[in-house]
Amino acid sequence: MFRRNLGLKGISFLFAILFWLFVMNQASPDTLTGEQTYTIPLVARGLPQTMVVMTRLPSIRVRLQGINPSANVKDLYAEIDLSGGVPGENSYDVKVNPPPGTKAIDLQPSKVTLKLDSVQEKTVPVEPVITGNPAEGYELGIPLVRPSAVNVRGPSAILATLDKVIVEVSVTGANDTIQVSRPVSFRDNQGKPIFGPDPTVDILSAYPGSVDVINPVMLKGLSSKMVPLKVTSSGTPAQGKVLSSLIASPASVQVLGTAQALKGFDSLNIGPVDISNLTENKTFQIQNEKVSLPPGITFTKGTVLSVIAQIGPGVIQKEIPRVAVQIRNIGTGLDIDQPASPVNIVVEGLPDTLKNLTSDQIQLWVDASGQGAGSYTDVKLYWQLPPGVTMPTTPQVGYSLKAHEVKGE
């Protein structure tokens, strides 16, 4: 069997070896061989963070001369230096660094014209776009967006025409209040999406990128209303501490009810929160069922109430030594015989207010209107103190006046 058709088998075997050698010696399609023209990407270098390219970067055609089997065409690219770029349209040189052993003999184009713009920030309102219809027998209230505005960063030319961002919410078939978090999107004046030169890269960004939307869905015949919250407290903080402020979160809430029930309902009291012996800030979570609402009025779904009690240091005392006392409104023909001596005073205020307080910031004086020559003790003292500073006790002040002495000729 092995001896049958030996000549044909030998020739076939020889061709197989030659074909294998041919394939093994063929270069990869990604390697650089001979003189060829390649289409390579263009990369921008050195672009400042305060600038953005408003033109799509073109592809570059380059003709390479030389053979470098170790080089890969996928590693080839052209670049432009934008480190000195300024807003507006300008031409920039295109450069290619060919791999060792090769030479770029033709570059098309060798220059590109790009438009740059400065990056700016702008705060714009968020507008909810509601799509669909609620379930039969239900209707929509006024949607609430939190936060109601976002900070947008992008090219100044686009920001100049951007007056809002939108958030889309579907209410199709809803029979209860909808509370969702959705990303904001950017639309131009015709409602079309805003894209940069490269649609795959976002040219605008927002902070925060998503917002919460509460859209009341209620039985027909009900109404919704935003009412501000008012907060009360009970007790006193720990010794040496004071209640700096009470902050309701949110500042206002949306409630549902009939038009008659909502009439005249202009604010809602929550609390009191117990701040007894607090030494630091505390957040109180308020349960909705413990808040007293008028008959026929309810919270919208997802309402969460809290109160932040901010606790600060209490009033302290500080002694200010040797504060000068002025004598004002001295009568005609009188001179000061014995001036009022500097006094040590005690002042009260918050620690931050008194921390850097000096005698130069305090004015003390007595009024000598209508007084004649003589000595005066325990006179009424007047003062002017910096804001937030008080003087709980008044020091005793004395001085004397004398007739003006006329020198002889």
Image (cartoon, rainbow, N blue to C red):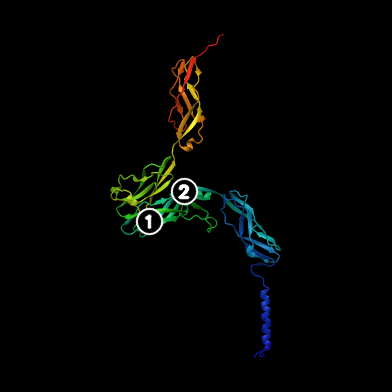
| Quadrant in which residue 264 is drawn | top left
- Image coordinates of residue 98 in percent, x first then y, are 68, 61
| Secondary structure of the residue carrying numbered label 1 | strand
Instruction: Kindly report which numbered mark, 2 or 1, lies closer to the viewer in this rendering.
Output: 1
State the residue position of label 2: 124
How far apart marks 2 and 1 lie (CA) works out to: 24 Å
Q: How many dots with numbers?
A: 2
**Residue 388 in sight:** no
Decide which of 55, 311 is in the foreground and name it: 311
How crowded pointer 2 is (Cα within 10 Å; few <14, some 14-19, many 20+) is rated as: some
Q: Residue at x 38, y 47 (%)?
A: 252
Circle 2 SS class: strand
> Which residue carries the number 1 mark?
178
User: Which is more toward the observer, 299 or 105?
Assistant: 299
Which quarter of the figure has residue 78? bottom right
Q: Is residue 241 above or below residue 214?
A: above
Type of the residue with mark 2: Val
